[in-house]
Structure formats: structure tokens, C-alpha cells
Image (cartoon, rainbow, N blue to C red):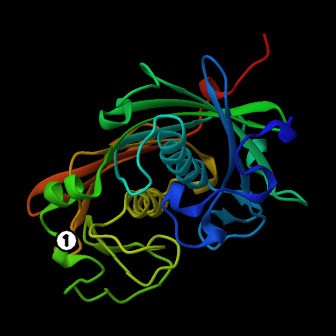
Amino acid sequence: MREAHQAGGWHGVDRRLVHRSANAEVFVTGTRASEDHIIVTAQWPRTHSLFIGDGEYDLSILMETFRQAAIFATHTHLGAPAASSFVMAAIRVDLHARDALAVGVAPAEIDMVMRVDGARTGDRWRRWVDWEVSYLRDGAPFATAWGRCRAHRTEDFRRLRQRMACMWSSDLPIPAGDPTRCIVAAGNRYRLRVDLADPVLFDHPLDHVPGMLLIEAALQIAADRGLNRRTVGHVAADFSGFVELSDVCEASVTATDPGITVHFEQAGVVRAEIAVRTMTAGDVLRDG
């Protein structure tokens, strides 16, 4: 099956097409297309400072792999220019078989069956693109995802942002505390801890707080509120605006059985909402 991959294969893909600087942070390895779907292959490492804990892959690695795959497929199958900048408006991941997250004696080989709404020709990449994904490991499905993204030409993104001067710099001091923590508790609320030197979350220069940092922060807040991270089976992130590097970002929490929703606010405006909940019996895939 893997010998048929038309791009990457065992050798990986151009890291620029998944918007990563370090080869070690590139999980996508190849792709091929059929009439109604795209298969993007990925490989998860046996060790990682952020995405693995206690012998199990964290749900966040599915979201990072989705991000890379959506960007890669928008480049390679929808024709987005290599120099494009991407905006991710939403991403949702649902786990259906937790055993598939076990770290094995070899890197995990993942197939992602991706479907895109609408045509895959012309200037489709210029509009919002919705991707639906099914994850398979060793041929067995174990998770699904959905996300919405859009590619922008570099000059269009610069006009959209109009704050490029703050790229890779921040006047805000890093709050004291555990460097592995993205949050600092402040009463019933939390303050986002942004470390521009983080080699994973800030793998390359950005002019805003990346969505993956907000997702990690939401998972840490859920754990702080008593939700066992190894029981999480659903994460849904909606990004309504950019979280800037130059301003303090605070988070509030709403309880939603069996989980929570985290609201990230900056300058009095909610910029993102991320729901985290445990895996339930209804999430489990059943044969037949």
C-alpha cells in the first residue's frame, strides 16, 4: 500500500508545505488522490516532548497532524502557492478507539482519508476549505476530524494582519512557573503563558499566538479542573480572531458535562473557544 504513494513516502515531505522549520516536527510523509478522496500518510515518533505522555500519544498530535495534512493537501491538491499563509478557523477531533494511541516498538504509521467540500480545481484554495478526515492505524479506523482553513497570498495576509512589526517579539515578560505549562492560574481564571523560545509551539517565526498553543493550554486547564488527560476523547476549537503576542490573554472556563469549554479573551474580546470532554461510550466504534 505505501509503495503507491506519489509524494514523500518513506522519505517525508518538504517541510515548507506543512509550515514547519524542523524536519523532526514534520509528521506528514506522503499523499495520493482518488476520485472522491485524498489519502495523506503520516508517521508519529516514539518520543516527543509535547505529544506523548506515559506511553500514549496525546489527542493533540491528531490535531497537529490534521493541521499539517490540511495545509499540505491545500498546497498539493488545491494549488495553493508554496508561499501562502494559512488561517485555521476551526478544528474538531473525536477519538473512537483509545488503544490506537498506544506508543509501540516502532513509529506509528497513520493513514488519513481526507475529503474536501466542493471542487478541487481552479482557485478553490482562495476560499474557506472544509476538510473531513478519518484516521487509520494498521488499516483500522480510530478517530475522525473536521476543520476549516484558508490560504492567503503573502501580500494579502500582510494586509489582513497589519501588525507584522510584532513578529517574533513580545514586550510581555514570561510568567514564572513550570516551563512545560502554557497557563498560570489567576483565581478562577488563567493567564496564557507564551514562550517564544518553545521549539515545538514556536517552530518558526509567527506574528500571533498559534492555535496549537491555545489547544495545549485548554488541555492543561482541563487537567487542572480534574479532567484526566488520558480520558479526553473530544476537542473542538473555534478561532474567531488572532491572539496577539503583544497583549495579555486570559482564559475563563464553563463546565459542560462531561467536560469544559475554555474561552480565551484578549482586550475584552473572546478570540477562541475550545471544548474538551472525556471519551464516552457513544464515541466507541463498533463493528457492523
- As drawn, which residue projects farthest toward the top? 288
Q: Position of residue 236 (x, y in %)?
A: 42, 41
In which quadrant of the rendered image does the N terminus lie?
top right
177 sits left or right of 103 in the view: left
Element carrying mark 1: helix
Query: Type of residue at label 1?
Result: Met
Q: Position of residue 88 (x, y in %)?
A: 36, 46
Q: Height in image: 186 above or below 113?
A: below
| Residue 269, quarter of picture | bottom left
- As drawn, which residue projects farthest toward the left? 268
Confirm whether residue 228 shows in the render: no
Foreground: 220 or 199?
A: 199
Residue at position x 49%, y 57% in the image: 226
Q: Position of residue 53 (x, y in %)?
A: 68, 65
Q: Height in image: 97 above or below 10?
A: above
Q: Which residue in the protein does label 1 denote?
A: 164
196 sits left or right of 287 in the view: left
Confirm whether residue 234 shows in the render: yes
In which quadrant of the rendered image does the C terminus lie?
top right
